[in-house]
Amino acid sequence: MDRLKIMHEELQSVKFWRAVLAEFVAMVLLLFIGLGATSTFGGQSSDTVHIALVFGLAIATLVHCTAHISGGHLNPAVTLAFLVMHKITPLRATLYIASQMLGATVGTALCRLVTPLNNNRYLGPTVVDEDILPSQAIVVEILLTFQLVWTVFATVDGGRKDITGSGPLAIGISVVIGHLSGIKYTGASMNPARSFGSAAIGGQWENHWVYWVGPALGGIIAAMSYDWIMDPNSNWDRVKKCATCEYGETENDEENHVTVLEPLPGNSARNG
């Protein structure tokens, strides 16, 4: 189906705008809950395990709540990965990312509203450790986001028959793992909107570009490697579809029951 026709139908669809709203609301909650875990009260500071569990469990919960509405992206790196693989349209990607960034900003502002300045002055910013270079930080963010987006693509693979557990929980655990591994290096963002929210309200913008370049590259590489190489149902038609900016199912994908974009307005629940 023609890309412009798909996007025109999306604009006229209530489901589409509901999906955009879901991304906004979920990001408000994610940032408010996650940054709350970085606040200090009673002289006790949050440790790495505490922060990792809060962000990971919050992601698992919110993806569970929004997967059937928007696909539960909640992350520009995830959205970009699905855009590059032509599973969503440029229109949907643009509005999702805008909603994610706005939601992250509102969630951070709400955290600021209820948190004394001395308890969380900069609102949990993601910061490159002083002992590593920005170039090293990018590598860290690429790898952390790669494992997250790889998990996402493996979870939503419609050709898999072996998954019996919770997909959102698997994604949440990957966020926990990323934090436990990388929080001392870069703050373990894996999510440009999460870093943007803290920077926009907390005012700490140093090396902010790292948290866009790293996650974006990591997510795109993960999507390509899974969809084109690692997926047992991978085929040349998928590569050709991306190269020709084609949307919708290829013949081989349909035969193998692989989860791909169906050209219907608002249909993203199985593509998140």
Image (cartoon, rainbow, N blue to C red):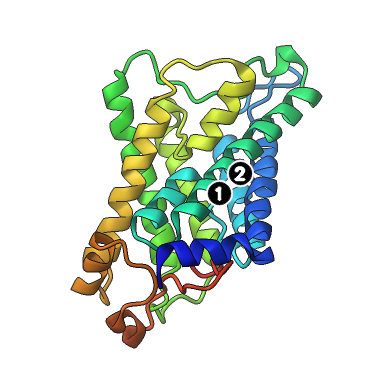
As helix, strand or loop, the secondary structure at mark 2 comes to helix
Give the vertical position of 219 relative to 193 (above or below).
below
Alpha carbons under labels 1 and 2: distance apart: 5 Å
Helix, strand or loop at label 1? It is helix
The answer to whether residue 207 is left or right of residue 253 is: right
Q: Position of residue 37 (x, y in %)?
A: 66, 33
Task: Name above or below for residue 188 compared with residue 129.
Answer: below
Amino acid marked by disc 2: Ser
**Residue 57 visible in the shown view:** yes
Give the residue pinned by disc 2. Answer: 99
Which numbered disc covers residue 40? none
State which quadrant residue 77 falls in.
top left
The residue drawn where x is 33% and y is 14% is 131
Percent from the top left, x then y, of residue 127?
A: 46, 21
Three-letter code for the amino acid on which mark 1 is drawn: Tyr
Instruction: In the rendered view, tell whether residue 235 sits above or below residue 22.
Output: below
Is the C-beta separation of discs 1 and 2 under 8 Å?
Answer: yes
Residue 257 position within the rendered picture, expressed as x and y whole percent measured from the top left? 38, 83
As drawn, the residue found furthest toward the bottom would be 255
Q: In this figure, which residue is indicated by the disc labeled 1?
A: 96
